[in-house]
Structure formats: C-alpha cells, structure tokens
Amino acid sequence: MPKDAGGLGVKSGELELGSYSPWTWKNVCKIKDKLKDGFGENCWLPDENGYTVKNGYKWLCTQQPKVDWCSLVWNSWNIPKHSIITWLVMQEGLNIKAKLFQFGFCEDNLCLTCREHPETITHLFYECNYSCRVKAARVAWLGRPFPTLTELQNGRKDSLQWKAMAMVFNVYVYTVWHQRNSTRLQHSVMRPELLAAQIEKVAGRRGCSKAGPGLSHNTNGWLSCL
Ligand SMILES: [Zn+2]
C-alpha cells in the first residue's frame, strides 16, 4: 500500500511460493477473480489490454483514502526506526495493555507509568501525566511548547522548523515507547526529566546532522536557531 494511504510503500518484493499455504493461495486467487470481474463488468479502469495484475494494483492504490499523518511519519529528518514506531502508533498497531487486556493477555489494563488510567495509545503518548511532564521538561530547549499532533498535521511541511519539530515528535514517541517497555520488564520508571534529556540529546544530534554545521543542540530556543 502507498505511504500516503497509510502503508509502508513497498513496491516490489520476492515471494517464496513454498512458504504460503494452499489456503492463502486459494484466497489470493479468489480476490484476483473478483477484481477481474469488476474490471470486465464495471469498467473500473478502462484499458484496452483488459485486466492485468498491474492494473488491478493501480486501481486498488487509487481507492485508498489518504491519511493526514504520512509526512509526519516519513519526514526526511526522522531516524527510520522512530518512523516505524510512529507508523504503528498511527495505525493503533502497538501492543498496548488496553488491547492485550481485552484479549486476556494481562491482568489489568492500567498504564504502567501512572497506574491511574487504562493504557491506550491516546493516554500513553498524549494524556498521561508522565508523558506530559516529559514534554514540558524541554520547553526551554525547543523555545516553544512541545508540538502537538494537530499542529504538525496542519503545519507547513516544507519548512526546516516543521521537519525539526516532526523529528522531535518522532523521537519522543520512540523514547516513550522504549521507556514503557523497560518499565514493563524492569518494574522501574525513569524520572521524566531524565527521559526528556535523552530526547533532547538524540533529537539535537539528529537535527544538527540534518541542518548542517552552525547549529548547536545545547542552545535554548533550539528550533528558532534553524
Ligand atoms: Zn499513564
């Protein structure tokens, strides 16, 4: 699926035929037959060559609704492993406790850091008191409040400041998720100020490497120096 439709944008790959069960192939063939009927009977994508797998893929791509977080996740300043976690966040694909509890894989659904509210994606990254303290701890360094998701989705995506803010957001998401997993395994929570310092360090280095020499990530009001 294309990136702007919420996919990973993988265009080609090799399939190992033996690794797919007969059931999978039977269903793939069923879908192909349905597409072929749609092309023939409903003229979904008129083409003198008739139905081909390539035309079917093109048609499927144009039918996907566009997502408004594509630029945020695939921002060129992001560290790739951070993009993947943010992509999972946007797809609600992380194995958070609210989901695991629903399927009986854990004893409660409470947030691991505050232990007060159910651990949902919204709570963990946007509403948890712990996460809010992490974001508030680096206001001086950024020179402005931590960027919100809505602000990033509506911002001017070709500016350096936007690319830097989006990158900082991605570092934040990755670091909070990593910390949450450490908490689960080690039963201890890092002080929010220390986690915020980690975010500043990683985002600052990345920003300096992307913006070029002349930018110091130790400067207060770092974003306005871009
Ligand atoms: Zn919480």
Image (tube, grey):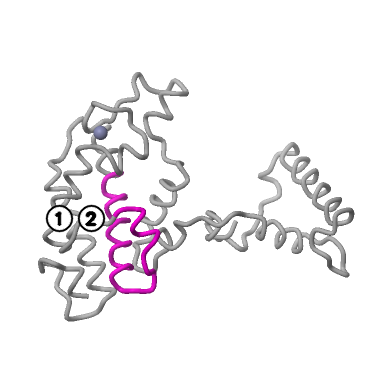
How far from the left and from the top, in percent, is residue 140? 11, 60
Work out whether mark 2 precedes mark 1 in sequence or the reverse, and give the earlier one: 1
Circle 2: residue type: Phe
Question: What residue did someone put label 2 on?
Answer: 146
* Residue 136 image position (x, y, % from top left): 16, 50
Q: Residue at x 41, y 24 (%)?
A: 101
Residue labelled 1 has its Cβ within 8 Å of some atom of ligand 1: no
- Looking at the image, residue 15 sits to the left or right of residue 37; the answer is left
Dividing the picture into quadrants, the one containing residue 123 is: top left
Residue matched to label 1: 138
Task: Report the residue at 13% width, 51% height from top.
Answer: 137
Q: Does 144 sit above or below residue 23? A: below
Q: At numbered mark 1, what does the secondary structure look like: helix, strand or loop?
A: loop
Quadrant in which the N terminus is drawn: bottom right
Start-end of magenta stretch: 148-177
User: Residue at the location (19% across, 39% down)?
Assistant: 130
Q: Position of residue 165 (x, y in %)?
A: 28, 63
Whether pointer 2 and pointer 1 mark residues with C-beta atoms closer than 8 Å, the reply is: yes
Instruction: Name the residue rendered at 76%, 63% in the picture.
Output: 55
- Say which quadrant the C terminus sits in: bottom left
Q: Amino acid at mark 1?
A: Arg
Name the image quarter holding residue 199. bottom left
Residue 196 in the image, given as x and y percentages of width and height: 16, 51
Whole-angstrom CA distance, mark 2 to mark 1, is: 8 Å
Some atom of ligand 1 lies within 8 Å of the CB belonging to the residue at label 2: no
Does the stretch in magenta take in 150?
Answer: yes
Query: Which quadrant of the render holds ligand 1?
Result: top left
